[in-house]
Image: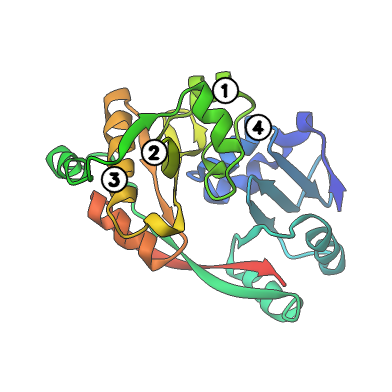
Amino acid sequence: MIKINDSERSNLSKLCSIRKDDSLLQWFLEGNPYCAAWVDDVMNPEVGIIIAADFCYLLGEVKHPAEVKQTLEENARHKIIIPCGTHWGTYLNEYMSKKVRCYSRYAIKHEPDIFDKSNLDQLIQKLNPVYEIRQIDEDIYKEVLGIDWAADGCCFFRSHEDFKKNGLGFVIVKDEQIVCIASSYTSYKNTIGVTIGTLDEYRRQGLAAACAATLILECLERGIYPEWEASNMNSVALSEKLGYHLDKAFDVYSLV
């Protein structure tokens, strides 16, 4: 497999069209630096491996299985591997069965007009007054980058200026310590991918719901759609509390 240059990303447009509404693939095509790709042929690729942030997409035809396997083992450690088509699922389950594990993620329906602002306000009002919600500014942005469980809320932007222009996020603070975050994992046009995190000892206190509700309300004010995808059923339950609806579960993989 051949690693392509950034200027050659448009050659993968046809392969990406199978998931034309996937904001991460669009993020890749527009040239985001937190992405990379490998193909079997630079000008006319039939096989594509795209890494965008923490995700790895398998696109096109299942060809060159040994080369694909090597590329994944060298570049997709700690990534969430998404097979784009049942043929790729078969490849992973059969050809790489000893190298991968399969698990579920959960697609949430894209429904721009579904949110109930009064419900979101109520979730915020339930927050214990010992906590304070703050919008991410430059100082908070820098602090978040140094917090393992929260860093995804800022780390895929080039700088604070990039985040200020294209991203959006909030944290909850107690005694000047960040204990929860709801922020933009990525952004593309008028959409952000939402990421949520809460410090372990502060979970199940309504912090994530309040912080996420604040983010969604600000998105609505700005004409931004807060896209949600869930990694587990707890995340699905939180999304439903905020007004989203589950679409379906789907298989993803990781290297072991």
Mark 3 near mark 4, Cβ–Cβ under 8 Å? no
Residue type at mark 3 is Glu
Residue type at mark 1 is His
- Image coordinates for residue 192, horizontal then vertical, percent: 44, 36
Disc 2 secondary structure class:
loop
Instruction: Nearest to the eye among marks 3 and 4: give it.
Output: 4
Instruction: Nearest to the eye among marks 1 and 4: give it.
Output: 1
Q: Residue at x 68, y 38 (%)?
A: 34
Disc 1 secondary structure class:
helix
Residue 175 got which mark? Answer: 2
C-alpha distance separating marks 1 and 3: 29 Å
Structural crowding at the residue carrying mark 1, measured as other residues with C-alpha within 10 Å and reported as few (<14), some (14–19) or many (≥20): some
Q: Which residue is mark 1?
A: 160
Q: Which residue is mark 3?
A: 111
Disc 4 secondary structure class:
loop
C-alpha distance separating marks 1 and 4: 15 Å
Structural crowding at the residue carrying mark 2, measured as other residues with C-alpha within 10 Å and reported as few (<14), some (14–19) or many (≥20): few
- Image coordinates for residue 98, horizontal then vertical, percent: 75, 81
Disc 3 secondary structure class:
loop
C-alpha distance separating marks 2 and 1: 24 Å
Residue type at mark 2 is Asp
Instruction: Nearest to the eye among marks 3 and 2: give it.
Output: 2
N-term mark: 3 or 2: 3
Residue type at mark 4 is Asn
- Quarter of the image that includes the C terminus: bottom right
C-alpha distance separating marks 3 and 4: 26 Å
Instruction: Nearest to the eye among marks 2 and 1: give it.
Output: 2
Mark 1 near mark 4, Cβ–Cβ under 8 Å? no
N-term mark: 2 or 4: 4
